[in-house]
C-alpha cells in the first residue's frame, strides 16, 4: 500500500483516480469545511472512510498530513489505476508527434530533493507543460512528499522516467523539438531567445547544474539575468520563471 496525504493531494486523487483509493483516513475531531468537502467527495465516489486519532495518522506518514491520509493501491497489476499519468518514453514521443501546436516539455536533470520536484511539477502544471521528464537514477520520484508539495499536479501532469536523459533529448531533437538548457554561464538571457516553437526546457540539479552529456545535447543555453548580490535562484523558482516567460512569448506570438 501507498499513502497519499495532505488536503490538496488527496482531493486531486479522489477527483482524478478514485478507484485507486482503498480507504480515506480522517483525523478524529476535524470538522472544518475542507475536511467536510473531502468526506462528501469520498462518499460520492464510494470510498470507505475511517476516523483515527491524530497520533495514528502521524505514525502512518512522515509529513504534515493536515488530518487526511488516502490509502492507495501500489502494485504492478493495478498500477495504471493509481498512476495513469506515469508514461514511458514511447508515450512521450508519440505525444510529440500527435499534438496539435508546439509541445512544451520540462526535463529535470538530477533533481533529487522531493520538495523541489513537487514545486517544479506544480509550476509545470500551472504553465501548461505537456510532460515532465526525469532520469530513473539520481532523481526524486513521485513520493507522498512530492505529491503533497505539488498540490495535485503529480496526479495530473504526465511524468516520464527515462533510462538515459541524453538519449531521450536526442530522440526529441529527431522529432523537431528544440532543446533549451538553463545554465548560469550562458551568453544569452532567456528573454533574448525565441521560445514559441516546440521545445524542451532542461533544468539541472541545485548547485551542480546540467551534466556534461545533457549540456552537449542542448541546442541553446539560456540564463536568467541576476541583478542582486546572489548568483542564482533555486531550481524550482528558476523553473517557474522560465516557464512563464515561455508562456508569455507564446501568448503574444
Image (spheres, rainbow, N blue to C red):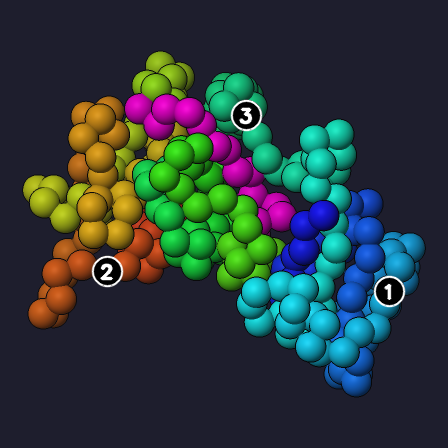
Q: Indicate left or right for 1 with 143 as reference.
A: right
Query: In this image, 230 relative to 54: left or right?
Result: left
Q: Residue at x 70, y 53 (%)?
A: 13
Q: Nearer the viewer, residue 32 or 191?
A: 32
Q: Name above or below for residue 248 compared with residue 197.
A: below
Give residue 41's position: percent from left, percent from top.
83, 63
Under circle 3, the secondary element is: loop
Residue 168: within the magenta? no
- Tell me if residue 14 comes above or below residue 132 in the rendering: below
Please rate how many residues cluster around mark 1, counting C-alpha atoms within 10 Å: few if below 14, some from 14 to 19, many from 20: some
Q: Which residues are magenta?
A: 153-166
Q: Which residue is mark 1?
A: 49
**Residue 148, percent from left and from top:** 57, 61
Q: Quadrant of residue 195?
A: top left
Judge from the rendering whether residue 134 lies leftward or rightward of residue 41; answer left or right. left
Earlier residue among tags 1 and 3: 1
Q: Residue at x 66, y 39 (%)?
A: 83
Mark 2, residue position: 233
Tell me how far mark 2 sits from mark 1, CA to CA: 42 Å
Which one is earlier in the sequence, the residue at label 2 or at label 1?
1
How far from the left and from the top, in percent, is residue 198?
38, 30
**Residue 88, numbered label:** 3
Location of the C terminus (image quadrant): top left
Amino acid at each position: 500500500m501507498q499513502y497519499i496525504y495532505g488536503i490538496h493531494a488527496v482531493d486531486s486523487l479522489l477527483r482524478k483516480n478514485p478507484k485507486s483509493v482503498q480507504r480515506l483516513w480522517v483525523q478524529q475531531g476535524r470538522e472544518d469545511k475542507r475536511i467536510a468537502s473531502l468526506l462528501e467527495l469520498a462518499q460520492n465516489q464510494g470510498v470507505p472512510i475511517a476516523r483515527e486519532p491524530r497520533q495514528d495518522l502521524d505514525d502512518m506518514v512522515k509529513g504534515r498530513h493536515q488530518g487526511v491520509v488516502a490509502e492507495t493501491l501500489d502494485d504492478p497489476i493495478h498500477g495504471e489505476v493509481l498512476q495513469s499519468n506515469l508514461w514511458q518514453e514511447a508515450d512521450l514521443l508519440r505525444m510529440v508527434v500527435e499534438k496539435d501546436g508546439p509541445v512544451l516539455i520540462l526535463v529535470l536533470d538530477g533533481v533529487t530533493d522531493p520538495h523541489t520536484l513537487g514545486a517544479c511539477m506544480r509550476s509545470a502544471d500551472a504553465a501548461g507543460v505537456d510532460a515532465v521528464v526525469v532520469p530513473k537514477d539520481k532523481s526524486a520520484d513521485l513520493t507522498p512528499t512530492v505529491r503533497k508539495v505539488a498540490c495535485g499536479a503529480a496526479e495530473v501532469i504526465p511524468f516520464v522516467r527515462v533510462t538515459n536523459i541524453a538519449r531521450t533529448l536526442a530522440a526529441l531533437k529527431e522529432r523537431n523539438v528544440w532543446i533549451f538548457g538553463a545554465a548560469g554561464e550562458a551568453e544569452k538571457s532567456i528573454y533574448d531567445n525565441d521560445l514559441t516553437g516546440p521545445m524542451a526546457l532542461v533544468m539541472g540539479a541545485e548547485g551542480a547544474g546540467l551534466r556534461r552529456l545533457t549540456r552537449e545535447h542542448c541546442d541553446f543555453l539560456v540564463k536568467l539575468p541576476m541583478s542582486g548580490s546572489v548568483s542564482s535562484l533555486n531550481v524550482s523558482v528558476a523553473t517557474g520563471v522560465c516557464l512563464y516567460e515561455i508562456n508569455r512569448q507564446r501568448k503574444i506570438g
